[in-house]
């Protein structure tokens, strides 16, 4: 065989897997680890993970902010509803405690009438002047103190 044929045969055996397989396996599996490349890859991976963590943290904060703004809007609308109900109830209380309404119900539904002069008796504390039945009986302590505080009292 010529050298050219030997080279062609050896290159054919190299590509087909025949020939010195021990040399091919040694060349294929033997790699020296490059520490600089390994460190650079580790730095890139660490940087990427920090960047992803920061982005996800910012995104989580934004989602929480949106959630809280929805909750705040809901609470504001609830507060407005309560304030409206409160004002309605105040109007209702004022209407129900109106003396004109109570008097109208007493006269209309219960059949009550206005009292005559002889049906009304004033309390001793509120009788003015020195005459009348109320002055013959002793006054209460608060009325007696008021009477003494008046100018011209005995």
Image (cartoon, rainbow, N blue to C red):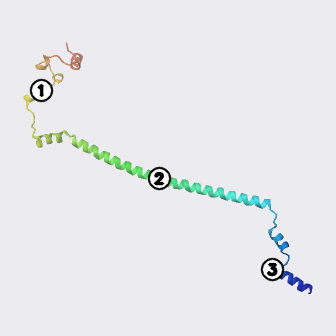
Report which quarter residue 114 is drawn in.
top left
Residue that label 1 marks: 121
Residue at position x 14%, y 18% from top? 135
Q: Which residue is mark 3?
A: 15
Q: Is residue 127 above or below residue 40?
A: above
* CA neighbours of label 2 inside 10 A, class few (<14), some (14 to 19), many (20+): few
Please tell me whether residue 117 is drawn above or below residue 38 in the rendered image. Answer: above
Q: From the viewer's perspective, is the residue at label 3 or at label 1 nearer?
A: 3
Q: Is residue 101 left or right of residue 115?
A: right
Q: Position of residue 110 (x, y in %)?
A: 11, 41
Crowd class of label 3 (few under 14; some 14 to 19; many from 20; radius 10 Å): few
* Callouts 1 and 2 close, C-beta under 8 Å: no
Q: Give the percent coordinates (x, y) of residue 71.
A: 44, 52
Q: Residue 19 in the image: x percent, y percent? A: 85, 78
Q: CA distance from mark 1 to mark 2?
A: 65 Å
Disc number for residue 129: none
10 Å neighbourhood of mark 1: few (<14), some, or many (≥20)? few
Image: 29 above or below 65: below
Which badge, 1 or 2, comes first in the chain's sequence? 2
Which quarter of the rendered picture does the N terminus lie within? bottom right
- Residue nearer the viewer, 7 or 119: 7
Residue 27 pos. (x, y %): 83, 70
Identified at 16% across, 24% down, the residue is 123
- The image's mark for residue 69 is 2
Q: Secondary structure at mark 3?
A: helix
Q: Nearer the viewer, mark 3 or mark 2?
A: 3
Q: Residue at x 82, y 79 (%)?
A: 18
Quadrant occupied by the C terminus:
top left
Q: How many marks?
A: 3
């Amino acid at each position: 065989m010529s050298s050219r044929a030997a080279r062609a045969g050896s290159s054919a055996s190299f590509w087909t897997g025949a020939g010195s397989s021990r040399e091919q396996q040694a060349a294929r599996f033997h790699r020296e680890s490059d520490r600089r490349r390994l460190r650079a890859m580790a730095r890139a991976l660490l940087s990427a993970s920090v960047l992803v963590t920061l982005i996800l943290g910012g995104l989580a904060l934004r989602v929480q902010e949106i959630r809280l703004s929805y909750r705040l809007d809901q609470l504001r609308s609830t507060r407005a509803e309560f304030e409206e109900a409160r004002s309605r109830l105040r109007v209702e209380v004022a209407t129900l405690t109106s003396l004109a309404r109570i008097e109208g119900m007493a006269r209309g539904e219960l059949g009550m009438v206005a009292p005559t002069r002889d049906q009304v008796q004033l309390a001793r504390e509120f009788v003015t002047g020195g005459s009348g039945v109320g002055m013959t009986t002793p006054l209460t302590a608060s009325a007696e103190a008021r009477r003494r505080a008046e100018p011209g009292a005995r």
